[in-house]
Amino acid sequence: MATKILVTDYQWPDLEIEKRILGEIGAELVVAPDGEETTLTTLASGCSGILTCWAKTTARVIGAALPDLKVIVRYGIGLDNIDVDFATRSHIPVLNVPTYCVVDVAEHTLGFILALSRKIAFHDRRVRQGSWNIQDALPLRRLVGKRLGLIGLGNIGQEVAKRARAFGLEVCAYTPRLTPDRAAAAGVVALSLEELLATADFVSLHLPLTPQSSGLIGEAQLRQMKPSAFLINTSRGKLLDEEALYQALSTGRLAGAALDVRIVEPAAAGDRLIQLENVLHTPHASFFSRESIEALQDQAAWEARRVLTGQAPLNLVNPAYR
């Protein structure tokens, strides 16, 4: 009997890369028609592996695959859609692809910074409406000498810092355990969260969603930021309080924001943040490029293949499962 691997969901044209890599070891893909828990639970039975992108891979889904299940692989970096604790207790290794889309998110973040600083989207809308008036967009600012504050300094944060310095930005960063030596190695200055928020011209979020980071940026933190500052989120929507952000933006306590991620995706009809002129929006697109997706498919499939053939995985996130 062929080894079965459940694919809970995916956002690319096809699964030919996965079929090739896993087919070479006699594995076949079971592709879910939707990401509902009931559907996944039914399909998980008898599967030796689970490849998951955004679908909730709950304890119920994982449990339905036991005792056959040998591995779970996240198509991506964050793990908030997988019940890692249950997998660990069930002795199932959970893997991710930590280098995936690092360059792409960094480029997207810099695109946001440039667009906010130069008000590119605002200019575009006004020109299309028949206005050729620079005064509508003032003030405009150059990036040289401005401060970028990174909340999170993992792989993506470090790539953002590298590119930001090329534009003449001073880069500082905060993480709970960031040491001055590690910050210096990344070419940034380590600051407390309070000092970063109070002094940065651009604040960009680059940290995973965890119980500790959920709601990290709320009303109190937004009030610490300069009225001329911009907030950028290409990480997870639940890192910030969207109602507090709306109030800050609509009352002039914050100059603008750029959001690639939202708490609810897509945003609900009539969403107030979408109606604000000083907010840029993209549809959770910062991760996406042809190169990043092909690399993701390849690396995720190979991680599953390694475990299923008795080899050590490269990116184990729950080492205690043993």
Image (cartoon, helix red, strand yellow):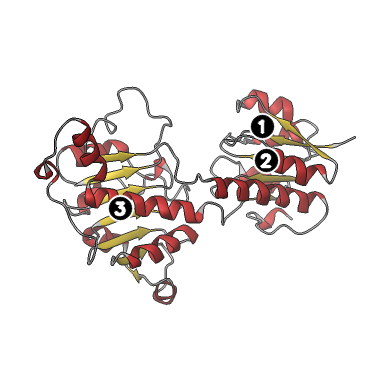
* SS state under label 1: helix
Q: Which residue is mark 3?
A: 113
Q: Amino acid at mark 1?
A: Arg
Mark toward the start of the polypeptide (3 vs 2): 2
Residue at 79% across / 58% down in the picture?
Answer: 311
Q: Which residue is mark 1?
A: 60
Work out how far the residue at label 2 is from the one at label 1, CA to CA, in angstroms: 16 Å
Q: Position of residue 241 (x, y in %)?
A: 32, 40
Mark toward the start of the polypeptide (1 vs 3): 1
Between residues 313 and 66, which one lies in front from this camera angle?
Answer: 313
**Tag 2–tag 1 contact (CB < 8 Å):** no
Q: Amino acid at mark 2?
A: Leu
In this picture, is 69 found above or below 149? above
Work out how far the residue at label 3 is from the one at label 2, CA to CA, in angstroms: 34 Å
**Tag 1–tag 3 contact (CB < 8 Å):** no
Residue at 35% across / 64% down in the picture?
Answer: 173
Name the mark nearer the viewer: 1 or 3.
3
* SS state under label 2: strand
Q: What numbered label is drawn on residue 244? A: none
Q: Amino acid at mark 3?
A: Ile
Q: Residues within 10 Å of mark 3 (few under 14, many from 20)?
A: many
Q: Residues within 10 Å of mark 1 (few under 14, many from 20)?
A: some
Q: Which residue is mark 2?
A: 51
Q: Can residue 206 be seen by looking at this rendering?
A: no
The quarter of the image holding the C terminus is bottom right
